[in-house]
Image: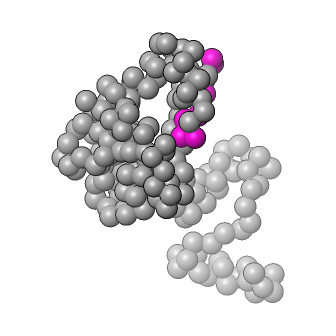
Amino acid sequence: MPVVMARDLEETASSSEDEDLANQEDHPCIMWTGGCRRIPVLVFHAEAILTKDNNIRVIGERYHLSYKIVRTDSRLVRSILTAHGFHEVHPSSTDYNLMWTGSHLKPFLLRTLSEAQKVNHFPRSYELTRKDRLYKNIIRMQHTHGFKAFHILPQTFLLPAEYAEFCNSYSKDRGP
């Protein structure tokens, strides 16, 4: 089961530490973080698609890592993951390490994820990734915590709703 195998990646750092840790520290796809360098982070390399390097591919294969892509067609993501040794599972499968989705997941699906399962979206992330929502949140923070603390972007207008304000500002400042 891939979820269990992903935990093995963490456990490998503490078991037979000298030999395995030395081998994994040198691997280009593993970066160690945490208190005593015990938390592995996978690093993906774009050039792995072109080089077809078996040394890079071995990580996903060794730990039986898998992914599924749901509600989107992400050929680049699929290529990167495959180049790193991940294998794709059916979209209805619950046996995966990474889910790449084109939309936000429902809260009940997020609650069912295990610790080793990761997703590319989390609830309400559009509040940061959509420029109009990010602007509205910064304005709200300016009102709450003061303009000086959140003076990080120029005056912005959401068109077409604020077109009249945009025209007034444009004519007053004589340009953008």
Q: Residue at x 55, y 22 (%)?
A: 21
Q: Magenta part of the protein: which range? A: 28-36
Figure quadrant of residue 167: bottom right
Residue 35 relative to residue 175: left or right? left
157 or 106: nearer the viewer: 106
Q: Position of residue 119 (x, y in %)?
A: 39, 43
Q: How many marks?
A: 0
The reply to whether the magenta stretch includes residue 31 is: yes
The way the protein has been coloured in the rendering is: one colour
Q: Residue at x 49, y 61 (%)?
A: 50
Q: Residue at x 28, y 59 (%)?
A: 71
Residue 144 relative to residue 91: left or right? right
Q: Position of residue 88 (x, y in %)?
A: 28, 49
Q: Position of residue 172 (x, y in %)?
A: 79, 83
- Asked whether residue 110 appears in the rendered view, the answer is no
Q: Residue at x 37, y 63 (%)?
A: 75
- Asked whether residue 50 appears in the rendered view, the answer is yes
41 or 159: nearer the viewer: 41
Q: Position of residue 29 (x, y in %)?
A: 54, 40
